[in-house]
Image: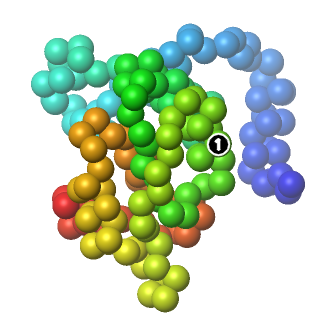
């Protein structure tokens, strides 16, 4: 796998600085976590102010999904998870290993290179109450076709 020049230079600069790089706390870097909450919920959202939001930093997207899958399974053990067809190849086995039944909802239309949005909404609307839906917020993998604007509102 190629190494970006900027990454190589940053690595060299860090090594030359001799600055200690201690482990992060188990839930991550506090300032990053606060920034994520502000980005997702807004800076003055009541649930954040009331301490009802918890944010955990994970190693990469797959690590975050693993943490999320285990967390959800603990509190919703009978739930099924619905993921896009297609989805990133490691998503299904990750959730199956956590003990979930996986259902695939319609997503990508190879004819239009777009989303089968009406089919997706119809399929998800019929999902049982308490189901878990995995949505790619951006950079849908493997299609690169993202839900946009008014579709998110729906």
For label 1, the SS is: helix
Residue 61, image x and y in percent? 58, 41
**Residue at the image position 29 percent from the left and 50 percent from the top:** 127
State which quadrant residue 150 falls in. Answer: bottom left
Q: Nearer the viewer, residue 154 or 8?
A: 154
Mark 1 lies on residue: 93
Q: Front-most of 44 and 124? A: 124
Q: How many marks?
A: 1
**Percent coordinates x, y for residue 15 in the rendering:** 83, 27
**Does the image show residue 96?**
yes
Residue drawn at (18%, 23%), measured in percent from left and top? 47
Tell me: residue 142, above or below residue 34: below
Location of residue 4 in the rendering, given as x and y in whole percent from the top left corner: 78, 54
Q: Which percent across, then down, holds residue 43?
A: 21, 32
Nearer to me, 31 or 137: 137
Res 29 visible: no
Where is the C terminus found, in terms of image quarters?
bottom left
Residue at the bottom extreme of this rendering: 111
Task: Kindly identify the residue that appears in the image at 56 percent across and 12 percent down.
Answer: 26
Describe residue 144's horizontal placement relative to residue 97 as left or right.
left
Q: Residue at x 38, y 33 (%)?
A: 79
* Residue at the left extreme, as displayed: 46
Foreground residue among 137 and 81: 81
Does 9 sit above or below residue 35?
below
Color scheme of the displayed model: rainbow
Q: Residues within 10 Å of mark 1 (few under 14, many from 20)?
A: few
Quadrant (top left, top right, bottom left, bottom right) of the N terminus: bottom right
* Horizontal side, residue 106 vs residue 118: left or right: right
Q: Is residue 6 left or right of residue 33?
A: right
């Amino acid at each position: 796998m190629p190494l970006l020049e900027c990454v190589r230079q940053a690595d060299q600069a860090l090594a030359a600085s001799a600055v200690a790089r201690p482990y992060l706390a188990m839930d991550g870097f506090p300032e990053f976590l606060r920034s994520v909450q502000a980005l997702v919920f807004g800076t003055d959202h009541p649930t954040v102010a009331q301490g009802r939001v918890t944010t955990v930093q994970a190693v990469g997207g797959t690590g975050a999904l693993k943490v999320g899958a285990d967390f959800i399974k603990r509190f919703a053990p009978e739930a099924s998870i619905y993921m896009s067809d297609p989805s990133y190849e490691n998503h299904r086995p990750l959730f199956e290993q956590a003990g979930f039944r996986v259902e695939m909802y319609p997503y990508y239309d190879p004819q239009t290179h777009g989303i089968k949005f009406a089919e997706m909404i119809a399929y998800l609307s019929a999902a049982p109450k308490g189901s878990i839906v995995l949505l790619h917020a951006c950079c849908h993998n493997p299609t690169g076709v993202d839900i946009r604007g008014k579709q998110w509102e729906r």
